[in-house]
Image: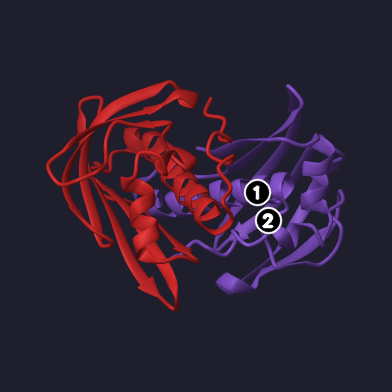
Chain colours: A purple, B red
Amino acid sequence: MEIKAKMKIRCSAHAAYEAFCDPEKITNFWFTKSSARWESGKTISLEDEDYAAAFDIEVILAEPDQIILFNWADGDDRRQCTLRFDEKDGCAIVEAVEAGWQEEKDNVAAMLRNQTGWVSMLTCLKAYLENGINTLRAGLVMD
Amino acid sequence: MEIKAKMKIRCSAHAAYEAFCDPEKITNFWFTKSSARWESGKTISLEDEDYAAAFDIEVILAEPDQIILFNWADGDDRRQCTLRFDEKDGCAIVEAVEAGWQEEKDNVAAMLRNQTGWVSMLTCLKAYLENGINTLRAGLVMD
């Protein structure tokens, strides 16, 4: 089963793609540290200091302004994440998909938690790219 | 099972509570129409013109700056929603809880969809109350 979220943003697909790949830009809406520019074949260390989280991702494919495919490990589980960038009516459409979930009942709380993360990230991305606001990203209280 | 989301917002609990209850304010981050001020015992008609949604809620309890408890029907299912308002370190903490979910596998997609709605709403509320931005709320693409 997949977790999916999709956001319409008044910007180009290029601007949305760059927001993830550029280590300075990503700090405005998602992680507080990204170790290098996201490119195919690279391992990137990510940190979120506000939520005391740190892990590596493996960028499988990064096709400028189109798609980023990366793997990350969530405990024993390996997730494959896809970010797709499209343009429609002068807006970027950014879709995030996290595959690799089993549908068992015990996973529901974890799926809801990760869905929360993706929706929050995409909404913060929209506020950053449309309004230059970078103060939304640490608002979620995860207890 | 419950769906839950919680947001820290740099404003008073009073300002956050009023954002829901005042029919003009709610249009900035959630519904495009709210038929009356939210008060205990009232039935309120809500519309979201951007997502072609319309339904009534029954406000069971509205305690200024503290809690709003309301019922709404989602098809055959009846949900009980609670919005709690607290203050901590000079910020409002707004918690949304939607109870009445069964944990069966078939419900997972619906739970993820509603979790998406709550997280998006609270993030848009934060942007509205902290930055006066009301252009985030219709960004989600739900297909």
Tell me the SS state at disc 1. Answer: helix
Where residue A36 sits in the image (x, y, percent)? 85, 63
Q: Chain of mark 2?
A: A
- For the question of whether residue B112 can be seen, the reply is no
- For the question of whether residue A92 can be seen, the reply is yes
Q: Name the residue that disc number 2 marks.
A: A133
**Left or right side of A46 for B105:** left
Identify the mark at residue B10; answer none if there is no mark: none
Identify the mark at residue A127; answer none if there is no mark: 1
The answer to whether marks 2 and 1 mark residues whose Cβ atoms lie closer than 8 Å is yes
Please name the amino acid that badge 1 sits on: Ala
**Left or right side of B15 for A31:** right
CA distance for labels 2 and 1: 6 Å
Between B99 and B140, the one lying in front of the other is B140
Q: Residue at x 73, y 46 (%)?
A: A129
**Left or right side of B128 for B46:** left
Compared with B91, A135 (above or below) is: above
Where residue A100 sits in the image (x, y, percent)? 56, 44
Where residue B103 sits in the image (x, y, percent)? 27, 43
Q: Residues within 10 Å of mark 2 (few under 14, many from 20)?
A: some
Q: Residue at x 83, y 48 (%)?
A: A18
